[in-house]
Image (cartoon, helix red, strand yellow):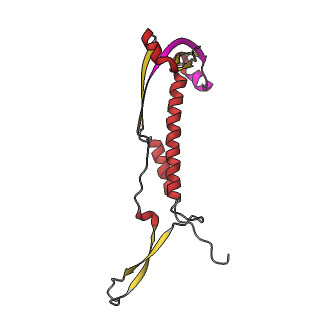
Amino acid sequence: MAILTSLEDMVRAIAGSIMNAQHMVEKAQLANIASFFDDSHKPTSIDIEVPAIHSGAAPDAHHLYRVPVISLVPHSSLVIGEAEIDLDVELGAFEHHERESVHEGIMDQLGRAAPAEKKAGLMVNPGNGGIAGKSGNAAHIKLKLVATEKSEGLARLLNDVVKTQGPVEAPAPGA
């Protein structure tokens, strides 16, 4: 017996899997960055002794220089920039599905341009694509998902959030 699913659900599942993979990459990057800080969220640093080069320094004078370790290593963001999936599926029948997540207020304003209450979905069997291809009842599907730049609105929001960050005043000793 053929296991049919809608093409829309299959594409949504593939896209969701790629988004979950990207989320795992991002979480790994955050964990990497967190490794450069201690438990009290202060940067891990090393102290090095460098020669004093100011004009009044003695010939063998040195001074202590504290360097945050995070500043010594390169950092880059990893993203899944492009994902390509190539597959064959067996074609099934069309089935009508109820539209979900339709905002009624917007639908009232759309008038005749509003989408129908039901939508047609193409049912496919992803497991029998190769077999169905021999009988001519198959489709070859190539999905290509690419990363896009963030929208202007999101960029402005992030910019505003970044502007609010800054040093936090430390409480006075003994307070």
Query: Where is 168 relative to 154, above or below?
Result: below
Q: Is residue 97 magenta?
A: yes
Please state the extent of the stretch shown in magenta in the rendering. 85-109
Tell me which residue sits at (50%, 32%) in the image. 15
Q: Nearer the viewer, residue 80 or 54?
A: 80
Q: Is residue 41 visible?
A: yes
Q: How many marks?
A: 0
Q: Is residue 165 left or right of residue 140?
A: right
Which quarter of the rendered picture does the N terminus lie within? Answer: top right
Which residue does the image show at 47% across and 13% down from the upper left? 132
Which residue sits furthest top?
135
In-front residue for pair 16/57: 16
Report x, y in % for residue 2: 57, 15
Q: Viewed as shown, does residue 72 lie left or right of 91?
A: left
User: In the rendering, at what x and y percent does residue 34 appear?
Assistant: 53, 58
Does the magenta run of residues contain 111?
no
The location of residue 122, given as percent across then percent down, is: 52, 16
Task: From this view, report whether residue 56 is shown above or below residue 118.
Answer: below
What x and y, as percent, mark residue 111? 55, 18
Q: Which quarter of the rendering shows the C terminus? A: bottom right
Determine which quarter of the picture holds residue 134: top left
Between 97 and 23, the one nearer to me in the picture: 23
Image quarter of residue 55: bottom left
> Relative to 47, does residue 123 appear above or below in the rendering?
above
Kindly tell me whether residue 164 is visible in this rendering.
no
Residue under the point 51% across and 67% down: 44
